[in-house]
Image (cartoon, grey):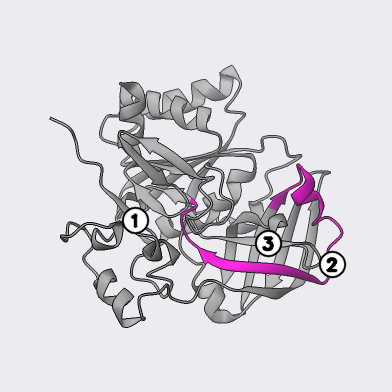
Amino acid sequence: MTKKIIYECIDAGSEYCPCYLAETNDCITCSHLQGKEFCDCNWRGVCIYQEYFWNGKKAKIARKNFIGKILDKKIIGDNLIIFEIEVAKSFARNLKQPGSYIFIRDADKPEYFDIPMSIMYSDENKGRIHVAVQIIGTKTKSLVNLEDEIMVRGPYWNGVLGLKELKTLKNSNALLIARGVALAPAVHILNYLIRNNNRITFIMDKGKFSEIFIGDYLDESKIITIEADILNQKGKLIVQELIRNNHYDLCFSGGSDPQHKEINNLLREFSLNTKYVITNNKEICCGEGICGSCTMRVGDKIIKACKSQINTSYIFEKEAE
């Protein structure tokens, strides 16, 4: 018997739904807007097909670019910059949830310089957001000399896969493992889990940076923190022993795909019932499901990873077959 793949669009029911995909019969959620003659969706909100007709059979307004004021720029080592950006309070509020990200670029550069960046911290009361940028290639190098203004586009929300499992976790045990620049999205996840009264062990790996750069964003009185290089043998043993000797209801992996797979294998071996949440590492270019750079195959389905939420355990089950 073939297991049906259940996936949902992160934008479904938002002010950006229906999007341009509806106009080409490529909607992620609505079967009518996939060209079918019957309703076979798993969406429980306001009917997307109805919204499409009410909007004159066209997509709703897309996310806009705007200029954000750079309030602070902190340079750490030779390959990391943390920007504090002033935005509208409503915009900051929309970036409070785990997996939130935006596109940023030098305002003097064309749109193909857009870079997706995870939100590390969002203050809706002051209208401020913080992003950590690892300086690697041409796009990120173009941000080094910015001092006053930066182009921003958003909000986007699919930077983490497994959001349903994460958001429903309460009064439970969680293990967070994050390496390098993935420490940034881990801050939002950590704070969300703390608000839901979860007990958290957080393994932090500075990766290629000179230091753990999220110290100012952590309240270590509420969590257990461990600094370790999870790529060397000692760090791997720490992760293995924690998973072997403790029951975790949820595990988050922030880092590379090989890291996701290795931790998943440990969970399969020692802790079969642990929910698994991972950073979305697919190549996100437009964020709207149009360009196709983020597509991935899961079973016999082609998934647009920039907009689709899918059970991560199923992804790894299919890879194991």
Residue at 24% over, 62% down: 32
Q: Name the residue under label 2.
A: 147
Quick one: 88 or 176, which is closer to the camera? 88
Q: Give the range drawn in magenta.
A: 133-159
Residue at 44% over, 65% down: 20
Q: Does 301 sit above or below residue 109? A: above
* SS of the residue under disc 3: strand
Task: Tell me if mark 2 has few (under 14), some (14-19) or many (20+) residues whose alpha carbon lies within 10 angstroms of its own.
Answer: few
C-alpha gap between disc 3 and disc 2: 14 Å
Pinpoint residue 38: horizontal percent, then vertical percent. 15, 60
What label does residue 277 carry, if any? none
Look at the image and tell me in which quarter the C terminus lies: top left
Look at the image and tell me in which quarter the N terminus lies: top left
* Residue 220 visible here: no
* Residue 231 visible here: yes
* SS of the residue under disc 2: loop
Q: Does 295 sit above or below residue 52? A: above
Which amino acid, mark 1?
Answer: Ile
Of circles 1 and 3, which is in front? 1
C-alpha gap between disc 1 and disc 2: 39 Å
Q: Mark 3 points at which residue?
A: 104
Sequence order check, earlier mark of 3 and 2: 3
Q: Name the residue under label 1.
A: 28
Q: Is residue 37 left or right of residue 26?
A: left
Task: Tell me if mark 1 has few (under 14), some (14-19) or many (20+) residues whose alpha carbon lies within 10 angstroms of its own.
Answer: many
Q: Does 245 sit above or below residue 196? A: above
Sequence order check, earlier mark of 1 and 2: 1
Quick one: 145 or 13, which is closer to the camera? 13
* SS of the residue under disc 1: loop
Which amino acid, mark 2?
Answer: Glu
Which amino acid, mark 3?
Answer: Ile
